[in-house]
């Protein structure tokens, strides 16, 4: 992937994270993003209780109470300063740092018992940088430590989202239809503009794809991956996969399954106890 494409994808997504839409979304009071995330936390929480935790891409702080319920030894990082400042205001006294997951050299190697990257944040960089993030997470994990992250499903319904979903839902009630039309006008105009700007970055590589996503009015371009490709990538970095949970129902996806209708996946893997690579 060439440098021009890399920098353009990064630029598009950074604009989205600093938008008013992102501010509204990330400051909404939420706990778990979906049943799959809750199932993943239920699985991993007892295994990491009391250990040092690293929370990547914290935004305005949604995951902070989820992580600190596991351990008080907590560090959170985000590369969007605007959102990080919101998190600091909400959770004063915690170790919250302005940092890019592609370069976490300020953090110690082989230290954390759990590294978590939620809400598909790893999908918002190009594929080469995705590998850099996984290698950095591997480096800072202690042997036997766990990795938890979510990623969009190349075979899920999100991959087929398009501009038409921004049109108002039809109803025979003229008052409701009028209200829905007025409400969707701005979203459709902004969504169309963003889509036309970003669609040139779309590319299907087979086992994964880059595509402009409907979130933030088609204002982001993200990676969609497959179960097989993500398992392969984790193994290549040095991780051993433990479990995958689907976003919709929170069901655990069997190891021999390669297709799913989930919108995204929650992957859990660990750094082998005897690992020394990247340390």
Image (cartoon, rainbow, N blue to C red):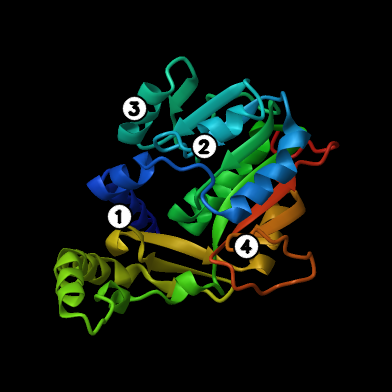
**Residue in the image at 21% along x and 64% along y:** 187
Residue beneath disc 3? 85
Secondary element under disc 1, as helix, strand or loop, is helix
Q: Give the alpha-carbon distance from disc 4 to disc 1, as whole Å.
A: 31 Å
**Which of the marked residues, 4 or 1, is nearer the chain's N terminus?**
1
Residue denoted by label 2: 63
Q: CA distance from mark 2 to mark 4?
A: 20 Å
The mark closer to the camera, 3 or 4, is: 4
Would residue 64 appear left or right of 13 to someone viewing this image?
A: right
Check contact, mark 2 vs mark 1: CB within 8 A.
no
**Mark 1 highlights which residue?**
12
Closest to the camera, between mark 1 and mark 3, is: 3
Q: Residues within 10 Å of mark 4 (few under 14, many from 20)?
A: few
Give the numbered dot on residue 41: none
Among the two numbered marks 1 and 3 on one chain, the one whose residue lies closer to the N terminus: 1
Q: Which percent across, then down, holds residue 80?
A: 35, 37
Mark 2 or 1: the one toward you: 2
Image coords of residue 252 (percent x, y): 73, 60
Q: Residue at x 72, y 41 (%)?
A: 44
Of badges 4 and 1, the one in the foreground is 4
Query: Quarter holding the C terminus?
Result: top right
| Residue visible at 43% across and 35% down in the picture | 78
Look at the image and tell me whether residue 27 can be seen. yes
Q: Nearer the viewer, mark 2 or mark 4?
A: 4
Under tag 3, what secondary structure?
A: helix
Tag shown at residue 249: 4
N-terminal label among 2 and 3: 2
């Amino acid at each position: 992937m060439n440098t021009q494409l890399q920098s353009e994808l990064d630029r598009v997504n950074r604009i989205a994270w600093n938008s008013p839409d992102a501010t509204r979304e990330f400051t909404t009071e939420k706990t778990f993003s979906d049943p799959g995330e809750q199932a993943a936390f239920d699985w991993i929480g007892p295994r990491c209780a009391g250990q040092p935790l690293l929370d990547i891409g914290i935004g305005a702080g949604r995951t902070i109470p989820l992580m600190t319920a596991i351990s008080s030894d907590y560090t959170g990082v985000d590369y969007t300063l605007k959102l990080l400042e919101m998190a600091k205001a909400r959770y004063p006294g915690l170790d919250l740092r302005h940092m890019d997951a592609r370069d976490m050299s300020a953090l110690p190697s082989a230290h954390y018992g759990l590294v978590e990257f939620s809400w598909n944040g790893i999908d918002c960089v190009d594929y080469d940088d995705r590998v850099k993030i996984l290698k950095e997470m591997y480096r800072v994990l202690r042997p036997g430590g766990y990795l938890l992250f979510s990623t969009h499903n190349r075979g899920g319904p999100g991959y087929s989202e398009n501009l038409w979903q921004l049109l108002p839902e039809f109803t025979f009630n003229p008052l409701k239809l009028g209200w829905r039309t007025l409400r969707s006008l701005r979203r459709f105009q902004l969504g169309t503009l963003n889509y036309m700007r970003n669609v040139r970055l779309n590319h299907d590589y087979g086992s994964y794809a880059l595509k402009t996503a409907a979130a933030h009015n088609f204002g982001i371009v993200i990676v969609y991956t497959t179960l097989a490709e993500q398992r392969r990538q984790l193994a290549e970095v040095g991780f051993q996969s433990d479990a995958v949970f689907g976003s919709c129902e929170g069901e655990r996806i069997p190891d021999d399954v390669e297709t799913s209708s989930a919108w995204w996946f929650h992957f859990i893997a660990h750094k082998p106890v005897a690992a020394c690579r990247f340390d």
